[in-house]
Amino acid sequence: MNFAHPFVLFLLLGLPLLAWWRRRLRLRTAFIYSSVQLVKPIAGLKRSPASRVLAALRWTALALAILALARPRLVEGQAQVKASGIDIVVSIDLSLSMAAEDFVENGQRVNRLHVARGVLKKFIEGRPNDRIGLVAFSGKAYVVTPPTLDHDFLLQNVERLNLETIKEAGTAIGLGLNAAVNRLRELDSKSRIVILMTDGVNNTGKVPPLTAADAAKALLVKVYTIGVGTRGMAPMPYTDAFGRRIMQNEPVEIDEAVLTDISKRTGGRYYRADTTENLKGIYAEIDRLEKTEIEMKKYQRYTELFGFVIAGAILLLLLELTLLNTVWRKLP
């Protein structure tokens, strides 16, 4: 429920002031006596319960009348909101190297996938009017979620991503990009974007990354590429023969030349994310660069409650008048 004219509700704040003013009027002296002894027998009389009930009915009726003026109404159905015209597919690397724990979050070391998932979720939550899809790849590429406005469903799928989602080993950057571009090719939109996140070098798959980039360019799909991971060495977790978890530094290898070429060919940009804050900043910049101002239309049906509320006010007034002229009638 909401109110068509909520500012009218401020009149309710005036009711206590009006009650105080009426009470002051009643307390004014009506007669002047030469001696208080003349009115001593009636000085201790108290207000009857009937008057309190009648006053409560009157004030409640007045409050309901004010509520009716504010036009309370029930909203029926869901609002239909036009999308912004920007369609985005995020292609995320799930190769085993994403297990490297070279990021820090809340003072603790976490792996690359954990950080990538968290930042991606914030990005999705900040763009409620865009269709966003999700592709995951390692040795092969799979469409996790096609571009959709159902972001609750999308966020659930982002949360389910893990390093065991895809069994095929390797890093097929070309396949990951190609699958994302194919999800956008049939969509009629003002702008089509791919965000490609990887921490490695293309080492498998039948589609070379630059061939997929040329396809994206032909379809007017802009590609933002993100190289995830620190430079130099990164701590990688392993399990030894005794089942113990150990950390071993491994060299980091990201094909920045190819990722930069992909973004340049398609009109996007390449970023290197080597810290959690850096990755958040990259998504914030992409969010800022890919904004489209449009007129959004909202359609809703309302059930007006004005009649019910004003009917309640009238009934209370009628009840007051009835009691005042029957059960609690005053002598003239």
Image (cartoon, rainbow, N blue to C red):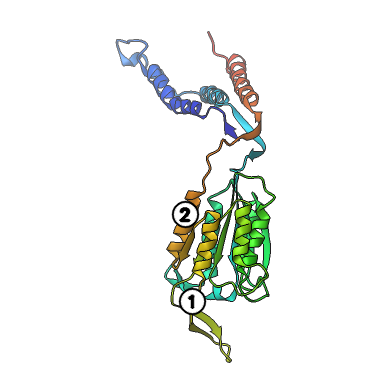
The quarter holding residue 28 reads top left
Q: Distance between the residues labelled 2 and 1?
A: 25 Å
Q: Which residue corresponds to the image point at 39% horizontal and 20% vertical from the top-left? A: 21
x then y, percent, for residue 145: 67, 58
Q: Name the residue at the bottom extreme.
A: 241
Q: Residues within 10 Å of mark 2 (few under 14, many from 20)?
A: some
The reply to whether residue 260 is in sight is yes
**Does residue 115 appear anywhere in the picture?**
no
**Residue 29's image quarter?**
top left
Q: Where is residue 273 in the image (x, y as percent from the top left)?
A: 46, 65
Amino acid found under the numbered disc labelled 2: Ala
Quick check: 29 left or right of 4?
left
Q: Name the residue under label 2.
A: 284
Residue situated in front as seen by the camera: 44 or 102: 102
- Nearer the viewer's eye, disc 2 or disc 1? 1
In the image shown, does 6 or 322 lie closer to the viewer?
6
Q: Name the residue under label 1.
A: 252
